[in-house]
Amino acid sequence: MKAIAAILAVFVSGASAQTVIYYEDGTTYTVQPNENVYVETAKKMYRKKSYKNGNEYFTHTTPSEKVDYEPEAHEGMEPGSDEWCEAYAPHLYANGFTFDDQLYLRACVD
């Protein structure tokens, strides 16, 4: 009986697992329930919809740009404070030259 309970526990925990996609730039995306994921290297991808009368309809599908929101270490801090400067330093120029980068240079660089 304990073996059956252990096997059921494994199946239940496996059924609730989430699929997470890790991108090269360090961002992630968690696939939602009933969401399809396709890995394709072709330039164009199409989605097929079949009808009961035998017709098939193809629509062009574009890649998704979705990523999960991850709060930055410096969020919630007062910009320009010593704590903010220390937390923001690794992110300097990470997204080009942003307003936060300007603030960092004015407030944190001696």
Image (tube, rainbow, N blue to C red):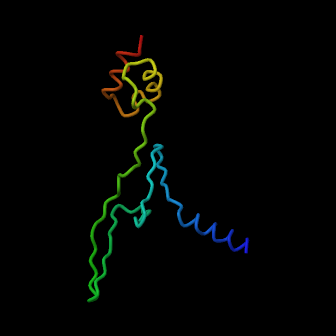
Residues 75 and 36: in front is: 75
Image height of 20 relative to 70, above or below: below
Q: Residue placed at 31% from the left, 81% from the top?
A: 50
Which quadrant of the view contains residue 85?
top left
Image height of 70 relative to 91, above or below: below
User: Which quarter of the figure is the C terminus placed in?
Assistant: top left
Residue farthest front in this picture: 1
Residue farthest bottom in this picture: 53
Residue 88 % position (x, y): 43, 26
Residue 40 horizontal side relative to residue 10, left or right: left
Residue 11 horizontal side relative to residue 44, left or right: right
Residue 73 % position (x, y): 46, 32
Residue farthest top in this picture: 110
Q: Residue placed at 45% from the left, 24% from the top?
A: 89
Q: Residue placed at 41% from the left, 48% from the top?
A: 68
Residue farthest right in this picture: 2
Image height of 59 relative to 86, above or below: below
Which quadrant of the view contains residue 56?
bottom left
Residues 96 and 90: in front is: 90
Residues 10 and 32: in front is: 10
Which quadrant of the view contains residue 6?
bottom right
Residues 36 and 43: in front is: 36
Image height of 102 relative to 60, above or below: above
Q: Residue placed at 73% from the left, 71% from the top?
A: 2
User: Which quarter of the figure is the N terminus placed in?
Assistant: bottom right
Residue 14 % position (x, y): 58, 65
Number of numbered discs: 0
Residue 42 % position (x, y): 39, 63
